[in-house]
Image: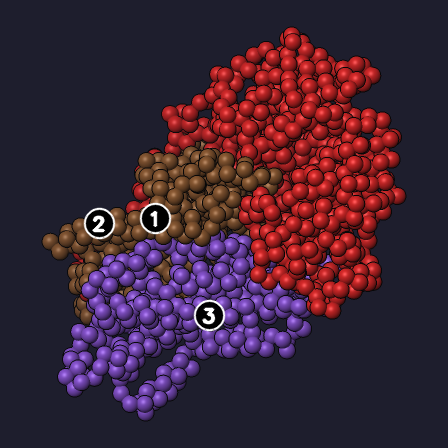
Amino acid sequence: MKLRSNVNARPLSVTLVVLAMVVAACTGDTTDTTGGADTTDGGEATTTTGETTDTTAPTTGGVSNPDTFVHAADDEPTSLDPAQVEAGEGGETVILQVFDRLVEFSPEGPDLVPGLAEEVPSADNGLISADGLTYTFPIRAGVVDHLGNPVDATDVRFSWDRVLTMDLPESNVGLLADNVASTEAPDAETFVVTLNQPNAAFLNSVVTQSVASIMSEEFVEANGGVAAGQPNEFIATNPVGTGPYVFEAWNRGENMLFTVNEDYWGTPANLDLRIEIVPDPDVRVLGVRAGDYDTIETDPSFVGEVEGAEGVTVFQGEFLLEPIHIGLNLNFPADQLPDTDTIPADFFNDPRIRQAFNYAFDYNAFINGALGGFGAPTPFYLPQGVLGYSEDLPVYEQDLASAEELFREAGVWDEGFTISVIAEQANLFEVAALVLKDSLEGLNPNFSVQVLAVAEAQFDEAFASDPLPYAMWVKNADPFADPHAFMNEYIHPDGNWGQVHGFRNGYQDADQIASMIDEASIITDPDEREAIYQELSALLYEDPMWIIAGNEVAVMAHRDWVQGFVMNPLWPRPSLKFALFDKG
Amino acid sequence: MAVEPAVREPAVAFAGGLGIRLRRFGEISREVLRNPTTLIGLILIVGMIGMAVFAPLLIEPNTPNPNQMPRDWGALNEPPGTPGHVLGTTQQGGDVLYGVIWGARTSLRLSLIVVSLTVVIGLIVGSLAGFLGGRLDELLMRLVDVFLSIPELIFALAIAAVLGPSFGNIILALAAVFWVKYARIIRGQVIHIKQNEYVDAARVIGDSGFRIYMKDVLPNSITPVIVQATLDMGNVVLIGATLSFIGLAEAGLAEWGVLVSQGQAGISAGRWWASTFPGLMVFLWALAFNLVGDGLRDILDPRTESRR
Amino acid sequence: MQIRDYVLRRLMVLPVLIIGTSLIVFTLTRVGGSPIAIYLSHEMTPEEVAEIEERYGLDEPLPVQYLTWAGGMLTGDWGWSGVAAAPVRQVFPNKLGATLELAVAAGIVAVAMGIGLGTYGGSRRDRLPDHLTRVFSISGAAMPIFWFGILLLIVFWVGLGWAPIGRSNADVFSSITHPTGLYIIDALLAGNWTALVDAIWHLLLPAVTLGFGTTALIARMMRSSLVETLSEEYVDAARAKGLPEKLVLRRHARRNALIPTVTVIGLSFGFLLQGTVVVEIIFRWPGLGRWMADAVLRGDQATIMAYVMFTSVLFLLVNLAVDVMYAYLDRRVVLGS
């Protein structure tokens, strides 16, 4: 095309650069939340808009970041407010460091140690009433929060009441709401709780949990107060508690910064804390090898990458208390299942079918393949580490002959069936679903298992429906310290899952199971309870409502220079209290 | 409305008898074969389509669903050269060679379905807009403009995201995005022909609109449509693999994008094979169709400049 | 003047297109998917789900929801991002800065290398450099960005250990202030050499990956229009006058070959924009693209809608600018229909 030759077209790149600078001037004053700021505009530019750390060649010799402990987490919290955080969600670990509760789990195990309460209530010291309904907590004197506000029994009551008033659907308020009848603070150093019914698991299943964390009333009132049904946006991003770490900053998508609480009532932390948010496992691996991270959220599947690396140790601890299980639904309207499913509504009512599924599953493939050997089968429903667990309890192993026999007896062998299982995509749950699929389809070509691996959000949404429109699903259990919590949640015919999934339709003797669970919850003698739970477990082996794919072992890769390393699976993931560590 | 260069006469006039058309086809084929880069493209296409069609003969199909990767939980992350796994295995024990071969089949299905759908839809919409003109034309072209204002990949991404992760939804998403080009091409041809003299002459003779359409519009449109369709055969797979890579395909599918995505995690550990081989296939597929498409464009419409 | 009319006409159509796009985006996400899913946790009862619905206004009738959302877009309330757990508007500027830096860097790489390669090939027509340029160009169009990026990572990150991933070293990054949100500019303003090196070092691989396809496109365009121009009459005249070949090239041919190239550069914008999604995933770049990818996988509709609207409006504006420039430069072109 002919053009006048005096046209001089400048490359568009220059224009783009100029444009960029203009736009940048508008994007420039971005701020991230820092402790104490109330709005995000008008602030000066922060020092970090936050970027991912780079990872290059590993360091040799010398401790990196000698004043700060750096942990690489795999996900980011959505809220740091105890009244809003979900169970098992990233915010819980921050709450663990920043807040205190009345009693805590000791680093070594399920024993309880005093927190803001000076003594752990028990029947012996009289702080638990004879009828098991009243708990009295003597509160430590002289405790202040990170802003200097004094914290006493009235603040404890305030904190718990606040959770109940806000009653946020995403929170764990149910723990308090289901158990607590009333709370009182007769004086500044005494806090009294009255329960709805006796519960031997109250202390370790409720009082130690994030939702029961304590903050000062003055702090809350000065920052948005309490409103029923409304989240408090300020506290969700600026937690202020009494714990060993003071929250400093949250650089979204990048990291969270904490400093040592010098005025902590207990043993102060040794180092400042930085929690890096690193969703990519290989970046975490490279980071710990390079010394950029001191501890990393470790998945059993990549332990092999770090094992033997210079300067890195892989700690193998107790089992996590979150067995990965596949649920069986006895309460679905047959017309609501995916179109491809051919099973009748009462498919899982027959215990032989449920047993057959349990026999068919390839536990080996899952535990040694997906979990890299860092796991074990689990009896119903007593994960390793809780009262009642014993190696002698019956667990399912893959037994294809028995599975076939049971399927034939139940009359589904020749015709076969198609069934769907829903799971979250791109994680262990999807893998468990695929193992189930391969196990069943390999057993009989007439069996077909459709794996619906969906985004977490979609899974959560489906899961929140009652009844659940899927015959099977994969998830892990929520971690509890007490066998009653597991049994009540996952086994009891009238418990949460029992009702939603129609356990009464399938249990051979639902009342017997219910009464055993109820009985064990009020007995205080641990040996008696243990006996009941073990009998229960044997019964459940014959009448399973789940397929437990396996229970993971707690593993964590950390640098050799970390001192005092200890993990307690009863603490929220990653099960670490950073205040206990040192480097050198 | 985007600016278009003055519509040029198609360099190839397909109007005329069947004999002329066959001869012209022969001429074009010879030209295609003479150009080295186009020839390479053609060979690649034949090779990959062959691989796709003969997949069950080349490698044992997985049961019960051959479109799913076989999983061998005892052979995770094997490097290439391991007995039984020439190209290695993935982190779920899937044979990379299987993924390469059956991925071709998946890609062929994807591209054929999407291109057919989009050509047909584009044909219908473009013809309606061009022939009927007036308000309908304006409305449809506005719609086309709106569709064009959202960048392709992002639009397909959003559609596949809301529909849910599955192969079928990727097909839908791509079809929803790719049809606009054909609508424009056809409409442009229709309008051009409408303005042209021999249509008036044909009308005088008494030819109905439909005959004009079949005799003049369609044959003249074929050229740019063929060029675009050839290019799209490549680009559909390219964008489809990108969508799968981001995570919008179903679990365990034997598809190149899915495999590259899965293989990513192992890279820092030195496991390069699970990503490299499937990704190479995507490249070769897109390259092949682009080479042939470009060659065709040069031969059939040497002075046309494509704007997108 | 024709051009002014043309521009005015295009500008008047712009709001219509934007509204049309917003309708499509809204319908797509609200009707096709589930907006509430991202805000749920797996423990919720149906009653709790209803509470969440109310909180985010998802129980209103659809037209009301659309107006609320559209109104919010115009006034600055872009919704709550489930993925980032923060208002979309708050998170946006940070990520925009990161993506912008990447896109501009890639653009610079593409333009510089594209024009250079195109000139090199076009001026030695049909000889080896020309063929190589052609092969390179076509590879660029067919190259899957995600594969190219992973290859580069394998070679340079894992293999040679040269290049880092991510945008910066956290300590270096936090050692300077960030008035513009663009790391390189901020480092220059602060006069901090370490930070500048850190910024460029991290930017290198992603920018090359992102720019590769565009480089090929520009090289191609440059080459073919250079070839065409070189055969024009006035170039022959210049040659006949006795001007050295190099001067012919520099003074006449190249400048005129630049014009269609400029158009292509503008069009590459769309290509670059889309490429950022994949490049940011692979190189762990904390920009808009990666955010969108997360949002897509996790059903975060607020983010998806905001991102699609933002990119579409940007795309529309750039296309308009390009078309106007094109119309200005080539007066023979038919303006509109």
Q: Mark 2 lies on which chain?
A: C
Q: Is residue A91 above or below residue A397?
A: above
Give residue B111's position: percent from left, percent from top: 47, 69
Mark number, residue A406:
none
- Callout 1: SS: helix
Examine the rendering and report whether any part of residue A94 can be seen.
Answer: no
Q: Earlier in the sequence, mark 1 or mark 2?
A: 2
**Residue in the image at 66% along x and 60% along y:** A343
Name the secondary structure under disc 3. helix
The brown one among the chains is C
- Determine the image quadrant of residue C213: bottom left
Q: Which of C303 and A526 is in front in this view?
A: A526
User: Mark 3 sits on what residue?
Assistant: B113
Q: Quadrant of residue A515?
A: top right
Q: Residue shown at 32%/90% (left/top)?
A: B18
Q: Mark 3 lies on which chain?
A: B
Instruction: Give the colouring mode of the picture.
Output: by chain
Q: Do the residues labelled 3 and 1 touch (CB within 8 Å)?
A: no
Distance of label 1 from label 2 (alpha carbons)? 17 Å
Look at label 1 and name its amino acid. Answer: Ser
Quarter location, residue A121: top right
Residue that label 1 marks: C22
* Mark nearer the viewer, 1 or 2: 1
Chain letter, colour purple: B
Tell me what residue is drawn at x 55 percent, y 24 percent: A165
The answer to which of B142 and A259 lies nearer the viewer is: B142
Q: Could you tell me the amino acid type at mark 2?
A: Leu
| Mark drawn on residue C11 | 2
Q: Position of residue B222 (x, y in %)?
A: 33, 77
Q: Distance between the residues labelled 2 and 3?
A: 38 Å
